[in-house]
Amino acid sequence: VLEEKTFYELGSAFGQVCFVAESLGAKTIRGFELSPVHMWIASAIARMRGSQAVFIRQDFFEADLSQADVLYMWLIPKVSTKSCEKIIQECQPGTVVVVFGTPLSGVTPQKQIPVDPEDPQGLKFSVYIV
């Protein structure tokens, strides 16, 4: 799914998901993070790993998302609606959006994948195609 794709993580923290995306073949990996501490640690880990991932200290609402093939984010309810509007405005048709936590507001996901298959009512990954 990620081979030769451009992967963006919105709210990348220490970059773990970016590193997984890279191991799955993503060619361009960008993590957007507001916390300078998280961004600095993620960048240091990337250097130690020899990773091509780039971490940017920026509010993802101000980032240009138009080049992403795949977006990943862990949403909290208060940013769900605003995130959905930005994604629809900026992402190209066919962009895959994977959301952990609160689904995008007002949009039905194409697929929902339970984190724990034994608990289908628990936390889910919601997958959308722009």
Image (cartoon, helix red, strand yellow):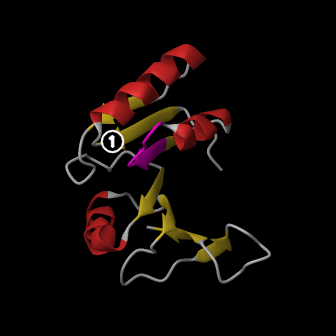
Q: Secondary structure at mark 1?
A: strand
Q: Which residue in the structure is indicated by mark 1?
A: 33
Crowding around mark 1 (Cα neighbors within 10 Å: few <14, some 14 to 19, many 20+) is: many
Instruction: Tell me if I can see residue 5 in this picture.
Output: no
Q: Residue furthest front?
A: 37
- Residue placed at 26% from the left, 70% from the top? 85
- Residue placed at 60% from the left, 72% from the top? 124
Instruction: Tell me if I can see residue 113 in this picture.
Output: yes
**In the visual, does 96 lie left or right of 91?**
right
Q: Which residues are magenta?
A: 7-14
Quarter where residue 43 is shown:
top left
Magenta-colored stretch includes residue 36:
no
- Residue placed at 55% from the left, 15% from the top? 48
Q: Residue furthest right?
A: 118
Number of marks in the rendered image = 1
Looking at the picture, which amino acid does disc 1 mark?
Answer: Glu
Q: Residue furthest left?
A: 62
Of the 4 image quadrants, the one containing the C terminus is bottom left
Nearer the observer, 110 or 105: 105
* Residue 116, image x, y percentages: 73, 69
* Residue 81, image x, y percentages: 29, 75
**In the visual, does 87 lie left or right of 69?**
left
- Residue placed at 32% from the left, 50% from the top? 66
Q: Please, is residue 35 above or below residue 98 in the view? A: above
Q: Please, is residue 42 above or below residue 13 in the view? A: above
* Residue 75, image x, y percentages: 41, 64
